[in-house]
Image: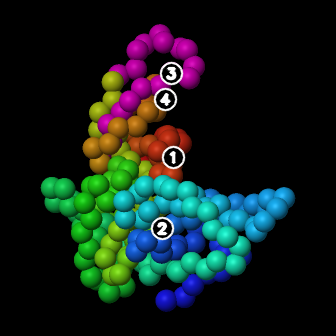
Amino acid sequence: MPTYNTSDLKKGLKVKLDGDPYLIVECNFVKPGKGQALYKLRIRNLIRGTVIDRTLKSGDSIEAADVEEIEAQFLYQQLDKYVFMDSKTYEQYELTKDQLDDAWKFLKESMECRMVLYNNNPITITPPNHVVLKVTYAEPAVRGNTATNLSKPVKVETGAEFIVPAFVEQDESIKIDTRTGEYLERVKE
């Protein structure tokens, strides 16, 4: 397994610590007045999702995580399981709602996602940056209410709820940023 020297560390690298794969979320180089230079890392466990801080000395090395990213298509949901298919090998993988974190809110059938495999087991997926979802339930707008910046919750076809401007109505399609979960715009189909 390849290793990284501390000078190679940067945001986005996947490393192995204490037997688990981690994603480097933040990497800061610190040179104190006396002593050895340090690398302060903020890393997220790719299996549990927990974020921890770790400090390494300059010259240390850290093992690369055995993770692989593949293109996977979301096929269907069966109770608490979400079934995906590798777009190249057609192998199917199942993830639970807990493993998906908030990504389940954006999944529509046939959607292409990025899947992370650790030792050939799926651990997480990343949906496209923007998705278009149909509003299945929205409270009707109050006539005469012309104040700006009013918002309301709506329910979309995936079962998730999002906060949108008050003018969005049921059966309209909206574009959502999957990285932030924020409403972007109405979409005409």
Asked whether residue 93 appears in the rendered view, the answer is: yes
- Label 4 crowd bin: few (<14), some (14–19), many (20+), radius 10 Å: some
Q: Nearer the viewer, mark 3 or mark 1?
A: 1
Pair 2/3: label in front: 2
Q: Main secondary structure of the magenta part?
A: loop
The residue most toward the right is: 33
State the residue lying farthest toward the left.
Answer: 79
Which span of residues is magenta-colored? 140-157
Residue matched to label 2: 22
Task: Pick whichever, 35 or 11, lies toward us.
Answer: 35
Camera-nearest residue between 80 and 118: 118
The label number, if any, that marks residue 139 in the structure image: none
| Labels 3 and 1: the sequence-earlier one | 3
Q: Circle 1 sits on which residue?
A: 180
Query: On screen, 88 above or below 183?
Result: below
Q: Position of residue 112 (x, y in %)?
A: 40, 68
Identify residue for label 3.
150
Badge 4 is on which residue? Answer: 165
Residue drawn at point x = 48 percent, y = 55 percent: 51
SS class of the residue under badge 3?
Answer: loop
Residue drawn at point x = 37 percent, y = 64 percent: 47
